[in-house]
Image (cartoon, helix red, strand yellow):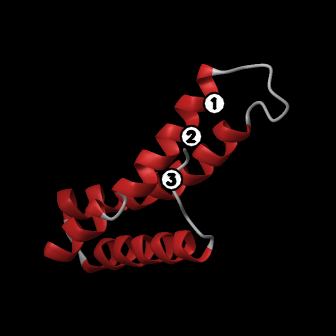
Amino acid sequence: MVVSVVAAVSTLPPLVAGLMLVWSDLQTSGEKFDGLGLALGGALLVPVAVVLLVLVLFWVRGGRVAFWTATAAAAVLALGLLWSGFSFPS
């Protein structure tokens, strides 16, 4: 159970960064790369949604498969963000 809570908490930085990218892109229009923040934010939010969905399934139903799927998805998300040089947008 503790690992599942840690996995849920580990999704907060990409969740915040994705929401910031989407929000900042929706605040402006007419730029050369209009919509890029929306695409990049969505690319961050989709894996976060997958991890949180599987974690919710684990918390509601229990089971080993959901637990290990969520843990593995959170680890892949974290490693992917570290590999890509993840940083908060300014």
Q: Where is residue 73 shown, x and y percent of the image?
A: 45, 72
Q: Is residue 1 visible?
A: no
The mark lying in front, picked from 2 and 3, is 3
The residue type indicated by label 2 comes to: Leu
Kind of residue at disc 3:
Phe
* Number of the label disc, if any, that sits on residue 21: 2
Query: Picture quarter containing residue 64?
Result: bottom left
* Image mark count: 3
Q: Which residue is mark 3?
A: 88
Q: Residue at x 54, y 44 (%)?
A: 90
User: Looking at the picture, how far across and down is residue 49, in whole percent?
Assistant: 44, 51
The quadrant of the rendering that contains the N terminus is bottom left
Above or below: residue 66 compared with residue 41: below
Q: Is residue 49 above or below residue 23?
A: below
Of marks 3 and 1, which one's residue comes earlier in the chain?
1
The reply to whether callout 1 and callout 2 are in contact (CB within 8 Å) is yes
Instruction: Work out how far the residue at label 3 is from the one at label 1, CA to CA, in angstroms.
Output: 14 Å
Q: Nearer the viewer, residue 7 or 27?
A: 27
* Residue at the extreme right: 32
Q: Could you tell me which secondary element the residue under label 2 belongs to?
A: helix
Label 1: which residue? Answer: 25
